[in-house]
Image (cartoon, rainbow, N blue to C red):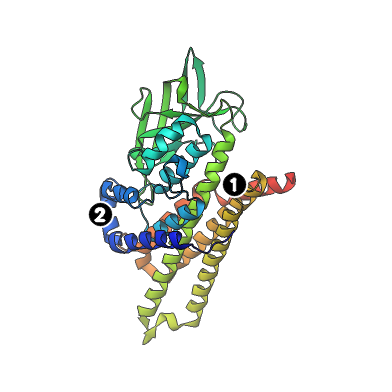
Amino acid sequence: MDFTLNDEQQLLKDSVDRFIEKEYDFESRRRLVAGTGLSEAHWALFAEMGWLMAGLPEDHGGIGGGIMENAIICEAFGKGLVLEPFLPIAVLAAQVLIAANGRHAHELLPKLAAGDARPVLAHAEADAFGELAWVETRAERRGSCWAINGRKMLVAGAPFASHFLVSARVSGLPGDEEGLCLFVLSPAAQGIKRTDVRLSDNSRASELVLTDVTVEADALMGREGEAFPILAQAYAHATIGLGAEAVGAMERLLWITRDYLNTRVQFGKPIGNFQALQHRMADMLIEVEMSRSQLFRAMAHLSAVSSERDQAISSLKVQIGRSAKFVGGNAIQLHGGIGITEEYSVGHYFKRLTMIDNAFGTVGVHLDRMAKLKRAA
């Protein structure tokens, strides 16, 4: 896989970088945090600039891009600590719709690309601990309809959703890959209780409690009981986007720290001249580049057979988790007390990297998955 950007991809990168530089400085972000956490003007701009359709195929209203385009946007958004739920909507939910195909994909994806729909995947549950097949939410047939009961935790972007893509089990036990389905629900459907929360990185999410939520038969996405491969492919794609965001955040954190060390003076000279601190910066740079290498490897294996894909995705997630902790922790330590203040950006990058470490499974979860895949090979 060639990771050199073509002309269109370079134009995409330049446009997102300009947006971050001109319209998403730290003070502007603080005002957004104090509000709803989403700027309608920004979301309209994402649609106008074609970022929401960048990773969509042409037959679904996109521009024929894919993982490279999404990674370019996510990396830039990581540098700017963008709050808007681009990854949950334009990457994760979009990839679920693409993989499921069918009527819902043809209806929702063009609207998503235009900024008129914001579908969000509601899949994670309290006892899953990163295990993709762990679904306790149940869907039962009642005549020609389905009744759904269960609870979904930390549904990113849910406060702004126009549709929920809800996973539910129709057969089997939690942890079984067979027996999973996906349903399209309206947020206004009777029986849905939504509790909104602001997470430590100031992004918004919700807990959904579903009590006898009744939907028509055509709310089912794809074939009954065969949703796991759809979820696995979508989460693989989204994990790469998450990794790209982490690389962007770590890179920006690295250069913020370098600039601080070159301006903070002790003993009559910038502390960046001290060899011990230069070694720290070199180690931080190595961690960033190791994460970038794992990101490229995961992108190259996205279309491989599931076992090879999952090994590469888990390897990326492990590296990102370890590097994020190292780079974020050292950045705060090198800044001293100012690094943890609410008024300074460094602590906010650390909080976002901590959330990324815990999203889609922790380091321990992915090490365990890598071991299982290796034993099964």
Q: Residue drawn 56% across and 27% down?
A: 223
Estimate how packed mark 2 is, as few (under 14), some (14 to 19) or many (20 or more) residues with alpha carbons within 10 Å: few
Q: Residue drawn 59% across and 27% down?
A: 179
Residue nearest the viewer, comparing 220 with 249: 220
Q: Residue drawn 50% across and 60% down?
A: 324
Q: Would residue 50 be seen by someone viewing this image from the given angle?
A: yes
**139 versus 159 height, above or below:** above
- Which residue matches tag 1? 365
Q: Quadrant of residue 24?
A: bottom left
Where disc 2 sits, the SS reads helix
**115 versus 164 height, above or below:** below
Q: Amino acid at mark 2?
A: Arg
Residue nearest the viewer, comparing 76 with 304: 304
Q: Is residue 177 left or right of residue 339?
A: right
- Measured in 3D between alpha carbons, the distance from the residue under mark 1 to the one under mark 2, in whole angstroms, is 36 Å
Q: Is residue 190 left or right of residue 139?
A: left
**36 versus 324 height, above or below:** above
Residue nearest the viewer, comparing 60 with 27: 60
Quadrant location of the N terminus? Answer: bottom right
Which residue appears farthest toward the top when viewing the image? Answer: 143
**336 versus 367 height, above or below:** below
Residue 354's disc is none
Where disc 1 sits, the SS reads helix
Q: Residue drawn 30% across and 62% down?
A: 25
**Residue 238, position as x, y percentages in the image:** 50, 47
Q: Amino acid at mark 1?
A: Val
Estimate how packed mark 1 is, as few (under 14), some (14 to 19) or many (20 or more) residues with alpha carbons within 10 Å: some
**Residue 362, position as x, y percentages in the image:** 55, 49
Q: How many marks?
A: 2
**Residue 224, position as x, y percentages in the image:** 56, 25
**Residue 77, position as x, y percentages in the image:** 39, 56
- Which residue matches tag 2? 31
